[in-house]
Amino acid sequence: MVFVGLSWSLTCFSQVMDKDTLNASVITDVHRGTSLSRTVLDGETIRFTLSPIGEGDVVKQIQALPGVTAGADAFSAFYVRGGSMGGNLMSLDGVPLYGKTHLLGLTSVFPTSLIEKTVFEKGGFNGRYGNYTSSHLNILTKNPAKEPTSAELTVNPFICGADVSLHTSHHTGLLLSGRFSPVSIGYKTIRPIIKDNVGLTDFSAGVWDLFAKITSQIGEHNQLMASVFWSSDQYSLAMQDETRQRLGWNNLMVLLMYRFRVSPHWHSSLSLSYHAFDNHQSLQDTYREQAVALDMVSGVGEVSFRYDNAVSLGRWIVINTGLDTKYAFFHYGPPADRGNNHDAFLVSPYLDMNSKIGSVLEIGSSIRENVYRNIIDKQTKAQLDASISLRGYILPSFYLEGTVDKLSQFYHNLEGLPIGWPMDIYVPSGNGMKPETALQFSISANSMIMNHSFLVGGFYKKIDNLAHLVEAGGLWSSAALSWKDNVDMGEGLSKGVELMYSFLGPSIQVSLNYTLSETTRMNFERVNNGLPFHARYDRTHVFHGSVNWKGLSATFSIQSGHWENGAPSTYNLHLPDGQIWTGEFYSSINNYRMPTYVRLDLGYRFQWGKGRMKHSLNLGVTNLFNRFNPSFLFYNTRSEKWNELATMRILPTFNYVLRFSVAGLNN
Amino acid sequence: MAPEERPFVVVECVLCEESFQTLSLSYSKAANGSGNSPIVDGRVILTDLSDNGHKYEFTHYEKGVWTCTCSAIQGHAYRLEVLIPGQTPVLAETSMPSNFSIDYNFYSMYSNQQLPEKYNLHPYAVGIIYTVASEFPIWVWGVNYNPDSGIREMAEEMCTDYSRVDSFNLSGALYESLANNPMLYFLDQDLTGRVSHMCYLRLNAFSGAPEDFLISGSLYGDHMFRDTPSETEGFLIFETVSDEYDLYLKDALTYLNKTTEYLDIYRRDNLYSNIVGGIGVFGAKIRRLLPWYNPSVNNPMNPYE
């Protein structure tokens, strides 16, 4: 079942959906509607898409969209129109979710079986959500009051889980879910019989999540909703050379929401939420016979209260207004260091107006005034966000669309940390760190002929006050005067062309997406002498293609390699005493392009069962060519050499779903 | 993991008051292995911007070393142009230091001189007190003559009580005086317990009244010359340097001293360079050689013996 979202309808209640009645097979992609700036995906589509862990993942679908470049192979990082990873807001029922992944990034943190739909925006934003500069991925969970009583079991090699939807009364529903990862058990089981090529002596992973949601209809038009999401990832890795790494992260999110109708044309909601995200990383190693022990923790907690309204003025105008308030607290640095704590307060009233003039013009506009205060630094900032989108229909099946967005973000996600696995370290704006801002323009032409959809567009994006971690040492050492000493601020520039073609036939679906882009970073005073350099995931060409035919599906991807710090030039350096040393010169950071990325995945979906019991089995092979697609470089402290590491070679996958419904299945 | 990069022009030239100047010119070794060769063709022009643009030209001597017969003049600004066929011009500018004074005095019970105020607790102390005032940074290091190898070697530890010494290269070792004459107080004992520096002392510039200070370190062997050190004597070298050369030296030594730390694996900083269109340094210096005093090897009665 595939839903197509219409982009102009932006209210929280009046999402207009077109329902596609095609039978889904193993879906590798989706007919995404007719906007390059906004994509709506339903939960079923996401769930049965091929992915390395067997079960579909919303982020894997996002990574295949035009204008989006993926991070390392198989992982969940994505970069939208040249923005930073931290510029993407992921929210769960509107609450920001800062710990975004499970399994070291192999999949996103939230169970796809509980997703009603996701809305992904990369331009023409509404003002309801803010504090991001690149994109917004809003995951909306199922409403158990509208679901039949059912239970479901999911098993794949990476995550096993069960969820129950209880329709306790006519107006009340309860959704419960729990998952855990069996990879640690699997490793210990097969370890005696597998050949160890990397010197791994111990590995353990504790990965789980729990979700509960209750909704209760109060009267005909009002609804009370409460939900809790709790997740944890903990990893420990030991090598023969006595290197040991530990890392992990946790999420806790609580949401209480009351939706009510003021009048037939005026709907409102009040919500109170709390989200805490923390992570830690430690490394024990030996380098040149010296023991190395590094330890770091970071976290962000946020309490939010918001009030939202949606008012329809006649048939053609919808106005959304509201107030979004957040109180956030941050900590980061070595565990013993209690000096790096910051509190911040953000108040953002907003106003959206979406109007339609006949059948030829749609106008969306929004403003959001952000008043931000870093309480520790005693610094207050006011920043106005604004967006406008215009869509003009030249023909009923052909339109032009343009968007302009001015955005700001008050939390920085420090990137550039080179030790081990990358961490999400959120730090607030304050003294010496201005809020990140972005100005973006996009234009596109869209047409649909029969079952063929063509979209071509271009974008230009300028980002200011990007944070870049210059030296890792300051974060790991409490001896550093201030972690800010290791952060430099600069600019980003990205421009590109996006192409999308899709065909939606009765038994075959085809999707082809291509992006040509260039993304640079510049004017960092202490990085690359202020000169421009490639953003790490500045992939010039990105192509994704997918075909689904009667249960059989294939996805193919070819992309320019990303950028790493390659070997330097060397030269002789004369010291005053006459000694000659070898100096190193990097013409730029990120000066080495990794090999071209190529991957083919194949899959097939079986479905059987009747009545209340239904089975679904996805079988697939990831990276059928067994191509070595290096994800990143890591430094071997013994050989003192950099090595390329590929995380995903050829990998057979499966995902089995057993669904039991009391009222009978509805799809 | 070799980026497709061309070799870069590497220039090293530090002007001095000597009667001729030398310059090193080469291609860097690119990551793909290309380059790494001396540059022997081209033109290298030195312009004295403080002398109506008077030009001097370097000529190739051997293996990428170029020389020019001229003396750099204190306070003058200079521009260097390197013109290599097929390459964009390489440019750099610097200025010769000026307005500095470096001196020393040997004190003993026989010298009949009054010790500076901060050392007057020991009226009969023995040792050398240095005095310096400079608007430019000063680099100091010591060399010892090693009779076994027959060459001069750099002292690995240096220590001072100078108030404006830069602590960028602290070694972590504490200075310990080797004085062992119970009848005398040797001035280097005032340095006991201070943290030593690795090889070099970098004295920050200042334009106030000259400051008195002590210097000692891992110095040994013959020394204590009167005018010019003999072939078998050690000495201290004081170099007042241009701002460009100072940045280059400090950056280079910081880099060299840090390469054994784990987190420095991830450093991607380039050394300071003021060469436009290339890498390296174009700087200037004024050098002075001064004696030092070590109570463990000197005759306190007559150190010049």
Image (cartoon, rainbow, N blue to C red):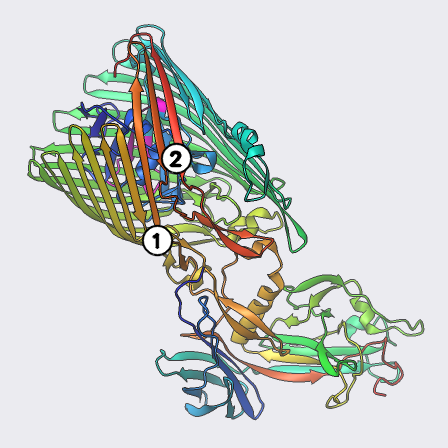
Does A444 appear above or below A289? above
The image position of residue A97, as x and y in percent, is: 41, 32
Which of discs 2 and 1 lies nearer the camera? The answer is 2
Quadrant housing residue B97? bottom right
Is residue A122 in the magenta section? yes
Chain ID, mark 1 = A
- Is residue B7 visible in the rendered image? The answer is yes
Direction from residue B277 to residue B284 in the image, left or right? right
Does B302 appear above or below A151? below
Quadrant housing residue A262? top left
> Quarter holding the C terminus of chain A?
top left
Does A130 appear above or below B148? above
In the image, A27 versus A9, the foreground residue is: A27
Direction from residue A391 to residue B16 in the image, left or right? right
Q: Provide the residue span drawn in magenta.
A: A113-138
Indicate which disc residue A52 carries: 2
Q: Secondary structure at mark 2?
A: loop
In the image, A82 versus A153, the foreground residue is: A153
> Quarter holding the N terminus of chain A?
top left
Count residues near mark 2 (Cα–Cα under 10 Å), then give few for <14, some for 14-19, many for 20+: many
- Provide the residue designation for mark 1: A492
Label 2, label 1: how far apart the Cα atoms are: 32 Å
Q: Secondary structure at mark 1?
A: strand
The image position of residue A493, as x and y in percent, is: 31, 54
Instruction: Give amino acid for label 2.
Output: Pro
Q: Residue furthest right?
A: B183
Is residue A302 in the magenta section? no
- Is residue A49 visible in the rendered image? The answer is no
